Amino acid sequence: MSGDEYEVEVPDLAEDDPMRAFLPASFGKKAKEADVAAQIGRSKRKIEIESVPTKPQEVAQEGGGRMGTQELAFKDYGSDSDDDSDSDQSDEDQYPVSHEMVLKIHSKAITTIAADPSGSRLITGSADCTLKIHDFPSMTPTTLRAFKSVDPTFDKGSDKTETHPINHIEFNPNAPGKFLCVSATAQGRVMSRDGDVLVEFKKGDMYLRDMNMTKGHISEITTGTWNPVDKNICITAGTDSTLRIWDINFKREQKHIMVHKSKSAGSAGRTRLTAVAWANQAQSDKNMLIAAALDGSLVMWSGDGPYSRPAAEIRDAHEPQTWTGGIDISSDGRMVVTRGGDNLIKLWDTRKFKSPVVTVSHPSTSDQYSVSNIRYSPNSSSIITGSATGHLHILNPGNLKAELVTPITSGSPLITVEWHAKLNQIFTGSANAEVHVLYNPDKSTGGAVSVMSRAPKKRHVDDDPNFTTDQSAGLSADTIITPGGIMTAGTSYSSRHPTVGLTASGRSRDPRRPHVPELTPFMKSQPDAKYINESIGLSSMRDEDPREALLKYQELAEKDPMFTNAWKHTQPVTQYREASDDEEQDGPEKKKLKR
């Protein structure tokens, strides 16, 4: 029978039979590969068609004359009509806005975004007083989260720690391992790309009237930037009407100070500096500093000095007492664009620094979010900024006309924007605590493109499901959805374990941990009680009642007297001298007074 052949009967199934889906196609373990095209396709932006306003916006020059009209260039993404298909395709090819990756890692508005020159690390700052550090090489489509959260003002050695919103962060272009962090305090900080504080600048004496005599800012710092040539030099702008240039190797005192003297009536010569930009000497024949102030002025200094007086100044560049939060200089150092709180965007020529070249109307958000910015593209071929309606505006750098207006977070103001040179990707931060990374798979490299090209990572049982999100479903992996039920936000690890871990300020959530009593301002100025008790003898007796301190030894003195212990044997019964009759009647003899 060994030579006999056996045949196995296989059921005959039709080609369209559903049972064929259950038949094995091959044997052995199958390698799960990522469908890159499908993952990138899911990240394609789906934008509804928006109508073009019937009434164009008027563009006025500084002298009151009308320069022309401007129409909002709303693009109809996702349109099926033949008329708009060609324009949509050209816009997607020209600007990296066809796809997006969304990061939801903060709890309050995003105020600033910075990516290192290599494009591998992204840091976001928020009004929740924290920095979130993201590493693109370690992220996958299902693990869009920050690997570290840092509070730059947190001090482990202090019992009482204050937290402050983040105003500005910026990587050093000549030393990518460091970035400048400006929070709402009087001290700027230089931090490593891992979130460690390397340098903390000195705070000035607030009781000195002459700002030239102070060694640091005496009030809140609004913004700052790096020297485009020297990796050790940075500048900070403060609300104390000063610009201070720092050498990070000498943190005890600023290297140079520029005091802006306001000429506004009733200002006593002081104002707040709201924005600063430093031109790149390698790309222009000038090294210049340009700053905007709350009194509406625009001031220019020579980047290499002297700093005693400005090289040029424009009074009433914007409306006084409005916050000009956005300012940037073109790559050739010839043009300057500013976005003011007076609902205007202005273009200036540094060679004729007297009046604006172009002025357009643009709704401002600086009254609510003072860190609203405006940026040139890496090659200065476009200008990008946000709006109060949540749209991204890409403007022409010559006439400031809108070339593309696309919604990012509709209904929520778009606060900060950045266009990365190497990645060719646009980062946006909104008031709804969302970070959007816009990219084009054909034009962009690295960053979000590399993240969406990786295979989804298997979620570990200990991973926080709040940070492990499936983009296709938009829900965490272990979320249970009940038909007709209400979805709750109690799926995060911290909500399920309220007593485990640390808070945002670094304190333990464990209620059994001893509570540190809050110190009043008076107690902060007093010496430590523990130090006094250890260094000064019997210092604790000052807090006791003398009578109570003596009476607590009464029982011990009766049982075991210290000084009369020997009389127990010689005189067990206390004997007193008998008083005479005269003493009983007249009392004890009084001492004679000396005359």
Image (cartoon, rainbow, N blue to C red):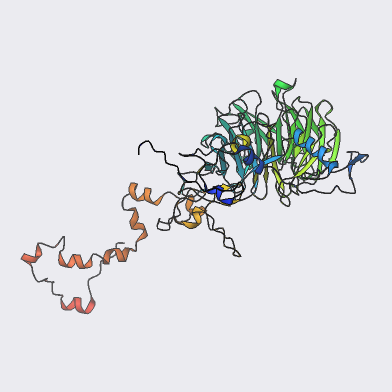
Indicate left or right for 405 with 479 as reference. Answer: right
Q: Position of residue 453 (x, y in %)?
A: 60, 36
Q: Residue furthest left?
A: 570
Near-viewer residue (169 or 418): 418
Query: How many badges with numbers are in the image?
Result: 0
- Regarding residue 395, the answer to whether it shows in the image is yes
In depth, the one of 267 and 127 nearer the eye is 127
- The spot of residue 579 in percent (x, y) is 15, 75
* Residue at 52 percent of width and 35 percent of height: 194
Q: Is residue 83 left or right of residue 369?
A: right
| Quarter where residue 242 is shown | top right
Spot occupied by residue 321 in the image (x, y as percentages of width and height):
77, 46
Is residue 190 or residue 532 the one in the foreground?
Answer: 190
Find residue 516 and report its image quarter. Answer: bottom left
Q: Is residue 467 visible?
A: no
Looking at the picture, does residue 474 appear above or below residue 4? below
Report the quarter where the C terminus lies. bottom left
581 sits left or right of 135 in the view: left
Side of 439 where 559 appears, left or right: left
Q: Quadrant of the N terminus?
A: top left
Identify the residue at image location x=49%, y=51%: 503
Percent across and percent down for residue 10 are 50, 46
The image quadrant of residue 179 is top right
**Towards the viewer: 192 or 485:** 485
Q: Is residue 581 above or below residue 444?
A: below
